[in-house]
Image: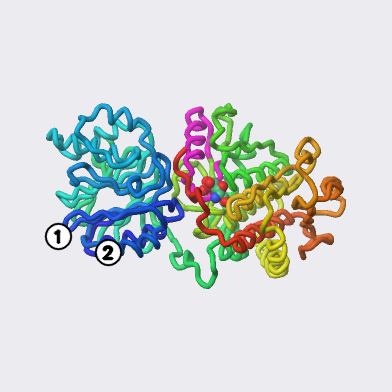
Amino acid sequence: MAYTGDEDAAGVILDGLKKLEYRGYDSAGIATVSDNPGLTVKKGEGKIDELDTTYDFGSMTGTSGIGHTRWATHGGVSQANAHPHTSCDDRLVLVHNGIIENHKAIAERLEDDHSYTSDTDSEIIAHYLEEQLHHGVPIQDAIEQFMETADGTFAIVLLDTETDTLYALKRKSPLVLGEADHGIVLGSDLYAIAPYTDEALFFEDDEYAIIQDETFTLYDADGREQDPSFRPFDWDVEGAEKGSYDHYMLKEINEQPQAIKRLAHSLGSTQEKAREQLAQKIEDASRVIFTAAGSSYHASLMGVYHLQAAGIEAQALIASEFKNYERVDEDTLVIAVSQSGETMDVIEAIEYSKDRGGEVASIVNVPHSTIQRKSSVSLEICAGQEVCVASTKTFTNQVVTMLSLAATLRDEDHDIAAIGDEIAAVIEHNIDRVQTLASELEDADDIYVLGRGSTYPIAREIALKLKEIPYIHAEGMMGGELKHGTLALIEDGTPVISLIPTPDDPIESNVEEVEARGAHSIRVTPHGGQFDLEANEDHFALYATTIGFLLSYYIAKAKDLPIDKPRNLAKSVTVT
Ligand code: AGP
């Protein structure tokens, strides 16, 4: 996050960092520059609010500044490794997202007298540029040389304290600029700049900007001036507040009904053409491959299930493994599924596919995100901002989008808006039951979740939530696979959650297998059992998902864990 303009920079940056904190929250820092005292840098380990209490960021003076909230890659979590990083002479100070892969090689080529204060790859950028300046290279040339020299990914904002100028550089990691009434704001995504503007300039790879006196100029890597193209966006800033909920996760679970209705409306109006285009591309392709990570991969598995049911051969591949398994040709359609639209593993899979002539479509939540911009057709899932690191309403809307696509392919109507009311009823009728179960499972070390067919991806998704939020080891698996090994782990009292859409579902035999070994058997089903669910087989998977989300939430709450910001994780994973 960076700002230069008329206002106190620290206030604008602090506000932006709070909005960006979901991207990483192990340490943070802000640097500002003013006539007196000049450069001030305050940074440390911990979350923004804690650091603000310690450092009182608002007391930092100056109308230009930069800030960063970190998710550690190179170098542990420490004050020294927190950004911003400075050059030895304190003239340059910068923040960086991404990884400078050849940072060691660059360091070896620099003179010996640099004094390094961190273990990060990022610090090398300040020393490299400083050395160029000492050799009389103009700063703009030094930046272009750095972009030529550096391997890896970066979104960098550099503040030259001598000239009060910001330099913003981008390769692969997202970077966005907005013009506020009172200055220029830069951030890693729309959320940070949304309070100040409704138009955003998304940097393309290897572009950089020089920002001074509230104006900016955009260049390509060879220093040719570029025409900036601003894209309008509409983002509900108020909607991103927690309101009366204790946690964003619970708020976002409860927002599923309205998010589904918003999506249903959009797919039938503003996105109708894009939905039909995507369905046509799916029909025309000789191979359809979904690629995604985490929850979005589970939603992709649902996509495979529903497309197969609609007569389309499809597969889903974890994005980080894409190139190890995939052969893509001109007749391949790759559908990238991503909430953030910025997951680097997915972006790399897209680039790999495009290099081989494949067409790329996407299903994203964040408009204008990198993945959307790289797609020939893109559907937005219209879930609104999701702040909790764990996906809930966005997973649901990804799955609803798959249902809608499958219905389009079958040329059928599917009243997906109705799922909204059904999920509202699931929440209302089961909240007490889930809390009771959560207190029973609070001390569990392992939980197994069984599904088959359309509930297999949901079993995986519930298991992921149980790992992420209450930190319980959980496995989501196909019920039929249990007897091929995992059954050895089921003993007296082992919790096993079975997702049972119909009374005659084959998963019943797996339930019997675990119950015969003394498992603590939890049956999620509309036919008996401890939950009150409608017997709508088509939407059962989403009811079960909601039960799983609530269960993970209430177990974590009982354990007093940091639900919205679980340890070691970040919402938008922009490194590979
Ligand atoms: C979900 O609860 C996780 N936080 C994570 O698995 C996430 O789904 C994954 O990182 C993919 O993110 P994306 O949808 O933004 O690409």
Q: Is residue 20 left or right of residue 277?
A: left
The coloring applied to the image is rainbow
Specify the segment rendered in magenta. Answer: 336-360
Residue lying farthest left? 136
- Badge nearest the viewer, 1 or 2: 1
Residue pointed to by mark 2: 181
Residue 450 % position (x, y): 75, 47
Q: Secondary structure at mark 2?
A: loop
Mark with earlier residue (1, 2):
1
Residue 547 % position (x, y): 69, 59
Residue pointed to by mark 1: 36
Label 1 crowd (10 A; few <14 / some 14-19 / many >=20) = few
For the point 35% across and 35% down, which residue is it? 100
Determine the image quadrant of residue 361: top right
Q: Is residue 59 magenta?
A: no
Q: CB of residue at label 1: within 8 Å of ligand 1? A: no
Give, as a three-letter code, the residue at label 1. Asn
Q: Is residue 427 left or right of residue 172?
A: right
Decide if residue 223 is in sight here: no
For the point 43% across and 53% down, which residue is it? 25
Q: Is residue 345 magenta?
A: yes
Give, as a three-letter code, the residue at label 2. Asp
Callout 1–callout 2 Cβ contact below 8 Å: no
